Image (cartoon, rainbow, N blue to C red):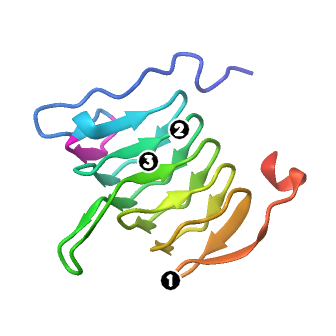
Amino acid sequence: MKNRFENWKPPRFDKNGMTKWHWKCQHHEKLKIGKHVDVGAFTYINAKHKVELQDNVQVGSHCSLYTVSTIDNKKGKILIKRNSKIGTHSVVMPGVTIGENSIIGAFSFVNRDIPPNSLAYGVPIKVIRKLTNKDKKL
């Protein structure tokens, strides 16, 4: 079976911040991407105050990552640590860190830090439980 990341390369952005995979990043010069990162189509990233996606991170389609919020004047770096997964249509707010190996369920509103090895979901986000070794192999 062919490894889906066998020919992986970091994204390239056009003059509008779009990638060939149909996701967009404003301020992409402040986006740090590790190896084998997978960002789904129609995702929007605002990296004005830095976004770091570490190795093997997956971000589902239609997600939004905001390092600045004009509604409540919050700003801050977003850090998504290695092997974490964010389900489709989720929103990550400024200053949030998602711990290593964590899974964020679809349609979640992530407005606080998530510890490593956690399953979390909801609006607002709630840690449901710690992940088992079996969960991490999925």
Q: Could you classify mark 3 by the number of other residues whose Cα lies within 10 Å: few (under 14), some (14-19), or many (20 or more)?
A: some
Work out which quarter of the rendered image holds the N terminus and state it. top right
- Spatial CA distance of label 1 from label 3 is 22 Å
Q: Which mark is residue 40?
A: 3
What's the residue at 43%, 34% (across, down)?
Answer: 33
- Spatial CA distance of label 2 from label 3 is 16 Å
Camera-near label (2 vs 3) is 2
Please name the residue that numbered disc 1 is placed on: 124
What is the magenta range?
Answer: 21-27
Is label 1 in a helix, a strand or a loop?
A: loop
| Residue 112 pos. (x, y %) | 50, 72
Upstream in the sequence, badge 2 or badge 3?
A: 3
Q: Is residue 38 magenta?
A: no
Q: Could you classify mark 2 by the number of other residues whose Cα lies within 10 Å: few (under 14), some (14-19), or many (20 or more)?
A: many
Is label 3 in a helix, a strand or a loop?
A: loop
Query: Is 19 rendered above or below residue 85?
Result: above
Q: Quadrant of residue 9?
A: top left
User: At label 3, which amino acid type do we have?
Assistant: Gly
What's the residue at 70%, 66% (across, down)?
Answer: 119
- Outermost residue toward the top? 7
Upstream in the sequence, badge 2 or badge 1?
A: 2
Query: Is 18 rendered above or below residue 77?
Result: above
* Viewer-closest of 117 and 123: 117
In the picture provided, is 14 more to the left or to the right than 103?
Answer: left
Q: Could you classify mark 1 by the number of other residues whose Cα lies within 10 Å: few (under 14), some (14-19), or many (20 or more)?
A: few
Is label 2 in a helix, a strand or a loop?
A: loop
Please name the residue that numbered disc 2 is placed on: 54
